[in-house]
Image (cartoon, rainbow, N blue to C red):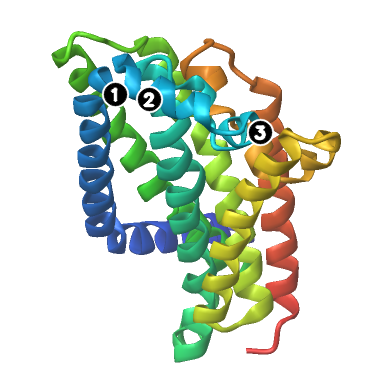
Amino acid sequence: MTGPADQRRSTTLAVARFEGRKRLRTTAVAAAVLSAYGILFVWVGPDLVGGEELQVLLDAMPPVLVELLGFESLASLAGLLAGEYYTFGWLVGLAGYVAYTAASAVAGDMETGRMDTLLAAPVSRSAVLLGSFLALLVPIVGINAITAPVLYLATVAVGEPLSFADLLALHALSVPYLLCWGAVGLLLGVVVGRSRTAGRVALALVFASWLTESLLDVSDYAWAGAVTPTRYLDTSAVLVDGQYDLVGAILLLAATVLLVALSSRAFARRDL
């Protein structure tokens, strides 16, 4: 005989599997696009970082702007990938996709009435919400698992292999970061209740977080950037210097748990 806890667990896993399968195709496409984008960086990287034109350009730019855009790390292929590819591909691009997907998933089901149909069965709201959130692991884990070996093999092919341990660490540390943004999107979807609006707000928050952290980092108010998730994933520190912020990853996971709990509480009280 199964108890309420077993029923909630079963419902959570069933929703996660169903929603996860729907994201398989998008995951494959996103992984292919990001892999191709990374290969392009690797292909032009050796000539770019070794050319005098880049140094002349950097010397002509204001130091604050160079630091803001992460150009100070462009002295190597690892620095180029960390400062440009992973900044716009992961910190902004993939995080924006995860946050938008989470925000529009629950809100979209509420708008279309699908959520009413699902909750008409003897299932708990918290189990359904948690299942939808866990389905985000499909694109998060899938894209990281595909792009990491592709980029490593590409750098080996051009004769400038990255540290595989550092590359693996960067992709592993990006999981808590992306989960945190997924939790932000989930809360927005529950609170706002309109998929497009919630998704757009989530995208704006991701971009604002990156921009705010970048601006604060070169100012006297760097401490204020502690409220942004972007503070806790330094791609250059991992890929160039081999420094892993494990405390930051733990803080991101703690924030994720808190945000999912707040989403569950708000969803339980929401009028559908």
Q: Amino acid at mark 3?
A: Val
Secondary structure state at the residue bearing disc 2: helix
Q: Which corner quadrant holds the C terminus?
A: bottom right
Q: Secondary structure at mark 3?
A: helix
How packed mark 3 is, by other alpha carbons closer than 10 Å (few <14, some 14-19, many 20 or more), is few
**As drawn, 145 above or below 130:** above
Disc number placed over residue 163 in the picture, else none: none
Q: Please provide percent x and percent y for residue 248.
A: 69, 29
In depth, the one of 5 and 102 nearer the eye is 102
> Counting residues from the N terminus, which is met first, the one under dot 2 or under dot 3?
2
Residue at (64% x, 74% y) in the render:
190
Amino acid carrying label 1: it is: Leu
Check disc 2 and report the residue beneath it.
Answer: 54
Establish if 150 lies above or below 192.
above
Inspect this view and state whether residue 233 appears. Answer: yes
Q: How many marks?
A: 3
Q: Position of residue 233 (x, y in %)?
A: 59, 32
Q: Which residue is mark 1?
A: 48
> Looking at the picture, which amino acid does disc 2 mark?
Leu
